[in-house]
Image (cartoon, rainbow, N blue to C red):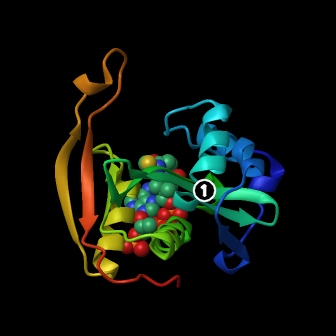
Amino acid sequence: MDESDKQELTPRELILREPTPQDAAWIWRLVRETGVLDHNSSYLYLLLCRDFSKSCIVAVDGLRVVGFISGYRLPESPSTLFVWQVGVSQSARRRGIASRMLTALIANCQKHAELEFMEATVTADNQASRRLFKKYAEQHGLDLVEETGFTEADFGFGDHAAEPRLRIGPLNQRVTVP
Ligand SMILES: CC(C)(COP(=O)(O)OP(=O)(O)OC[C@H]1O[C@@H](n2cnc3c(N)ncnc32)[C@H](O)[C@@H]1OP(=O)(O)O)[C@@H](O)C(=O)NCCC(=O)NCCS
């Protein structure tokens, strides 16, 4: 963590917006810093920021990306938003940034097309992530159903824990940005 990562920030200083390709390298760096999320190439984040920006979001503190969510609409079921990676800088955690991003992301997606469900896969031990999604469902009065998702075997070789799927919805009313 460098000095800039240790600066204090308050949620009201944040800007939440769709990412641009200029954010991709910062997102890549943030993913590595989480120490938890799967590492992907910077190229992948360029593609996400260029081609899937409407289903992704960044939280920017000044010029620094301190949080992001990547996602995409399922090609065979575009009314379902799959939320892929969620990350917040260590120094900015537990201040509601992930919750604000998730709410803003859903609201933005709903501006562009009908959205009925949100899905994410989360390991059994990731309490922070589980709480994030559970809280969203509770706050908006939505059902949260846990399904099989991806098993350990699905990941093939290597050491990757199973990722049950959380399905939230139906998102039948517009959610406003707080
Ligand atoms: C998961 C993560 C994105 C949460 O970001 P955050 O900005 O700290 O989350 P929020 O402050 O919005 O908190 C959302 C809820 O989760 C809870 N929460 C956050 N971190 C928690 C933790 N470590 N343990 C238990 N609950 C936690 C919060 O208390 C809050 O619930 P509450 O309001 O009922 O108390 C962040 O911890 C992170 O980047 N983790 C590493 C990457 C990761 O695991 N991503 C998720 C898998 S895709």
The residue nearer to you, when weighing 24 against 137, is 24
Q: Which residue is mark 1?
A: 53
* Quadrant of residue 41 within the rendered picture: top right
Q: Is residue 28 above or below residue 133?
A: above
Residue 160 versus residue 177 in the image, above or below: above
Q: Residue at x 57, y 43 (%)?
A: 34
Seen in the image, is 64 located left or right of residue 78?
right
Looking at the image, which residue is at 35% across and 21% down? 159
Q: Residues within 10 Å of mark 1 (few under 14, many from 20)?
A: many
The amino acid marked with disc number 1 is: Ser
Quarter of the image where the N terminus is located: top right
Residue 150 in sight: yes
SS class of the residue under badge 1? Answer: helix
Residue 156 image offset from top left, x and y in percent: 30, 18
> Which residue appears at 38% of the width and 71% of the height?
114
Left or right of 81? Residue 55 is right
Q: Position of residue 24 (x, y in %)?
A: 70, 45
**Which of the 4 image quadrants contains residue 14?**
bottom right
The spot of residue 106 in percent (x, y) is 45, 70
Q: Is the residue indicated by label 1 positioned so its CB lies within 8 Å of ligand 1? A: no
Check the image and name the residue furthest to the top.
157
| Closer-to-camera residue (21/138) | 21
- 17 on left or right of 120: right
